[in-house]
Image (cartoon, helix red, strand yellow):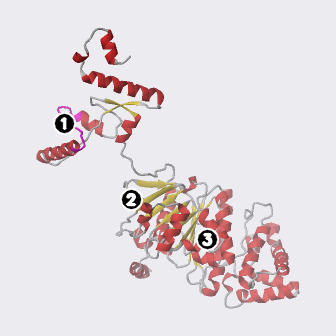
Amino acid sequence: MNLGEKANHTGYDMDIIPEDLNTYSAESKKVLYELQSQNEKWFNITFLIMNMAPTLAQLETDCMKAKSIAEKHSCELKPYDYNHENCLASCLPLGSNLTYPRRGMTTSATAAFVPFTTQELFMGGNSLYYGLNALSNNLIMAERKSLSAPNGLILGTPGSGKSFAAKREIVNVFLTTADDIMISDPEGEYRWLVQLLKGQVVNISASSKDCLNPLDLNMDYSEDENPLSLKADFIMSMMELICGGKQGLLPLERSVIDRCVKLIYQPFMADLNPARMPILEDLWKALKAQGTQESVNLANALEIYVSGSLQVFNHRTNVDIRNRLVCYNIKDLGKSLRKLGMLVVQDAVWNKITANRRLKKYTWYYMDEFHLLLKDEQTASFSVEIWKRFRKWGGIPTGITQNVKDFLSSQEVENIFENSEFIYLLKQAPGDRDILAKKLIISPDQLSFIENSEQGCGLLIFGGIILPFRDKFPTGTTLYKVMTTKLAEMESLETEMAGKR
């Protein structure tokens, strides 16, 4: 029975019943239905707008402007006179409403007042700073360790700020956590930052006194009881890089290398004395002693790295790689040794990560100019293994390169891109933008943030979240001086540091 029928039944004339009463009755029934049947909740809300101005005249003007704007949208703003202190307290983020009246509204109606129209990323714990949300100006704080695959990529055109972004994260990791940090530096861009943070810079070149032994082995090198089998696999990859043809090492050559590896490690495995750690010369002698044609060929190919002009890696390690921040500077290694140097650095990092796993410590590994590792079959396959295996060993690798096309050279290398849940995108070339839009399902609006973006601006992909960011670092700081990659500023720093020496 509706309101009119009830009125007639009780003897009232419908003409004398206010029209508002009939309207309110229908609305009340609608609200009751939503609360009972549509999972709506009931909220008592007060909507306050706080105006602040330096003078009373300016305040009155601002209030009139706000009132006129509200009237354009069929809303009425009323001044809350004689209760300003309670109004101010209610506007502060104290979680207390000291004002009246409070209007009742359902969930759907209340949602209209929620101001968040952008996605945010703000995590607790040891989360790191990755800039400001370009849409809301809120902090972006994220913890890569929380991702199921914390592997990361930093991509951008030359001059977009890739290396600077990597150094930015390195500083945050160093100051926020107790984790170890390893850096592969083909261009010598990280040494000043590492020195500022009291880290260890390992300069690998023909004229350097720093030595790194590619045959170093720790007993945590493999999950197996005998780590020697995995080390033998690395040595085969190294020998394949040194003397393998288009088809790589032959089966007989692999057998010879495996036999020699077991022989040269016998003294070390007997008492684990670092002074007994084998070097390349021991491998060379063992190959010569085998006396077969295959072993002689391998020994002859290895000779230049033992007693010839490329004997950089024929020494025991003499630098402190136990430092929590280690940078391998291979800028002056030379073209003929660059690939081998990168492979040896990767193995040194693996040694560090496996040792840290026993200590339950994370290890961050940064590979600048990552495309150099992806060009060669041996270093590329080792990089793929890093992306597949590092996570369960507590490793967090990050590759820094220019083009996403570098990851599409083969299905195997493409796994690196697909197994990275942290991708830091700076300004991208048109061809790369098209690939990224397809691979990562990035909308045209989001792509606009990496089209002609300024340095330090772009898109952050964190798991399933895509956020536009901007990160403007103050240029008048010591950190900026050691982090910048601008040529003029780097030359100025070189001059300044040379003067101090």
Q: Percent position (x, y) of residue 180?
A: 58, 62
Q: Residues within 10 Å of mark 1 (few under 14, many from 20)?
A: few
The residue depicted at 25 percent of the width and 41 percent of the height is 49
Stretch in magenta: 72-85
Q: Percent position (x, y) of residue 37?
A: 47, 28
> Residue 79: which numbered mark, if any?
1
- Residue type of the residue flagged with mark 2: Ala
Q: Percent position (x, y) of residue 448?
A: 41, 65
Secondary structure of residue under mark 1: loop
> Residue 440: which numbered mark, if any?
none
Q: Is residue 436 visible?
A: yes
Q: Please tell me which residue lies in front, 366 or 280.
A: 366
Nearer-N-terminus badge (1/3): 1
The extreme right residue here reads 291
- Residue type of the residue flagged with mark 1: Pro
When asked about the image quadrant of residue 17, the answer is top left
> In the visual, does 262 lie left or right of 28?
right
- Residue type of the residue flagged with mark 3: Asp
When asked about the image quadrant of residue 235, the answer is bottom right
Secondary structure of residue under mark 2: loop
Q: CA distance from mark 1 to mark 2?
A: 34 Å
Q: Percent position (x, y) of residue 254?
A: 82, 78
Secondary structure of residue under mark 3: loop
Q: Residues within 10 Å of mark 2 (few under 14, many from 20)?
A: some
**Label 3: which residue?**
320
The residue depicted at 25 percent of the width and 23 percent of the height is 19
The extreme left residue here reads 57
Q: CA distance from mark 3 to mark 2?
A: 42 Å
Quarter that holds the N terminus:
top left
